[in-house]
Image (cartoon, rainbow, N blue to C red):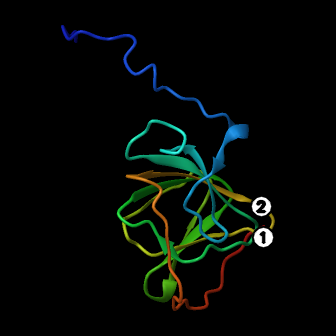
């Protein structure tokens, strides 16, 4: 299929950006034991309505309870084995393996954790409209036995 619409070969080349791994900085929104690094964000790019970065969780670490406001969140387990707790008392848990994707809807309170006591967990995460992080205090969190592997 061809089109007669004019194509500008130089369209948006002035705002194109590459962010090298060694130059990435911590994201503005942080939660205990979920260290966020901005890859593409309004802080380092002329981007609108998008945050894309990495989230690191050390061996056996579990994040604080939080949600992401109006943001839609997509996650991908790049390295390791993780889990997300949610629901009443954060009593529901789902485990995620390398290669798994997850969607966390807006305003859904959750806790993220590393299901390994020896390996780091790395998520690739994207949010729209921004990296909104609302940390929740004084939450009723039930005790759950975590299925740690390695």
Q: Specify whether 47 is left or right of 140.
A: left
Against 48, is 57 above or below?
below
Image mark for residue 119: 2
Residue at numbered disc 1: 117
- The count of marks equals 2
Residue nearer the viewer, 42 or 93: 42
Marking on residue 140: none
Q: Residue at x 71, y 74 (%)?
A: 148
Where is residue 2, by image quadrant? top left
Q: Residue furthest left?
A: 4
For image coordinates 37% across by 17% down, the residue present is 11
Residue 137 placement (x, y as % from top left)? 53, 84
Tell me what residue is drawn at x 35 percent, y 63 percent. Answer: 70
| Residue at (56, 48) in percent of width and height | 53
Q: Position of residue 143 (x, y in %)?
A: 61, 91
Which structural element holds mark 2?
A: loop
Q: Quadrant of residue 87?
A: bottom left
List x then y, in percent, for residue 83. Answer: 59, 69
Dot 1 crowding, Cα within 10 Å, few <14, some 14–19, many 20+: few
Residue 97 left/right relative to 16: right
| Residue sitting nearer the eye, 1 or 63 | 63
Q: Say if mark 1 contacts mark 2, CB within 8 Å.
A: no
Residue 146 x %, y %? 66, 80
Viewer-nearest residue: 18 or 149: 18
Crowd tier of the residue under label 2, counting other residues whose Cα lies within 10 Å: few below 14, some 14–19, many 20 or above:
some
Q: Nearer the viewer, residue 112 or 45?
A: 45
**Which quadrant holds residue 39?**
top right
Secondary structure under tag 1 reads loop
Q: Is residue 93 above or below residue 76?
A: below
């Amino acid at each position: 299929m061809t089109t007669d619409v004019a194509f500008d070969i130089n369209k948006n080349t002035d705002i194109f950006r590459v962010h090298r791994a060694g130059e990435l900085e911590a994201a503005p929104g942080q939660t205990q034991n979920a260290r966020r690094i901005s890859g593409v964000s309004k802080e380092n790019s002329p981007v609108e309505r998008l945050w894309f970065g990495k989230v690191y969780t050390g061996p056996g670490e579990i994040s604080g309870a939080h949600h992401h406001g109006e943001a839609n969140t997509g996650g991908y387990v790049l390295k390791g084995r993780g889990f997300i707790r949610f629901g009443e008392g954060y009593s529901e848990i789902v485990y995620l393996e390398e290669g798994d994707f997850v969607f966390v809807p807006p305003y859904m309170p959750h806790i993220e954790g590393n299901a390994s006591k020896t390996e780091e967990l790395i998520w690739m995460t994207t949010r729209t409209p921004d990296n909104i992080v609302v940390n929740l205090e004084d939450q009723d969190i039930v005790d759950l036995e975590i299925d740690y592997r390695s």
